[in-house]
Image: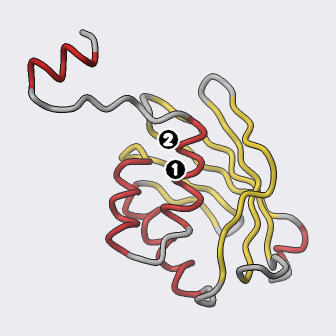
Amino acid sequence: MSLTLFSCLTGKEARTMASIPELLESNLHRVFGAKNDDDRHTAVLETYADQVTFTDPEGTSVGIRSVEARARALSEAAPADFRFIKDGPVYVGDHNGAQAWALGPEGGEPVARGIDFVTVESGKITSVITLLTEMSKDV
């Protein structure tokens, strides 16, 4: 069924699945960069599969509630003026993507750099692996 036909039959607007670059953007800015819990929660539901796995040097979390809790904890621990920024191009495969990022004070030097590798199925992230640079391990 076409999206236009779906809209006509149901009276609802059909949503297309998010692209891998859109999901990487959401993971970085709308989830981990969010300063508002309600906005973060909405983004988590739109971005991740229910049983998403998130792995970084601190360990592995499973499920959207665990990822949301880790993002909230990071936001609460970081100074208010810290922001995530993209730190290079987005890399995209059929079901995978990667985005390098930096974290630091807005307009200042980053205190941490990393890269997120994601696996995507049916328009949702099913796995995130975050690697940090050596400078980030000292922070």
Q: In this image, 94 relative to 42: left or right?
A: right
Judge whether 13 appears above or below 106 on screen.
Answer: above
Q: Residue furthest right?
A: 134
Q: Which amino acid is tagged 1?
A: Thr
Give percent across and percent down for residue 91.
74, 36
Q: Earlier in the sequence, mark 1 or mark 2?
A: 1
Q: Which residue is located at x 43 percent, y 71 percent?
A: 69
Give percent across and percent down for residue 28.
59, 59
Judge whether 68 appears above or below 49 on screen.
Answer: below
Give percent across and percent down for residue 18.
46, 36
Q: Nearer the viewer, residue 134 or 98?
A: 98
Label 1 sits on residue: 53
Q: Which residue is located at x 70 percent, y 64 percent?
A: 85
- State the quadrant of the N terminus: top left
Res. 115 image quadrant? bottom right
Judge whether 2 appears above or below 113 on screen.
Answer: above
Q: Nearer the viewer, residue 122 or 138?
A: 122
Distance in Å between CA atoms under marks 1 and 2 = 6 Å
Give percent across and percent down for residue 3.
27, 18
Label 2 sits on residue: 126
| Residues marked 1 and 2 touching at CB (< 8 Å) | yes
SS label for mark 1: strand
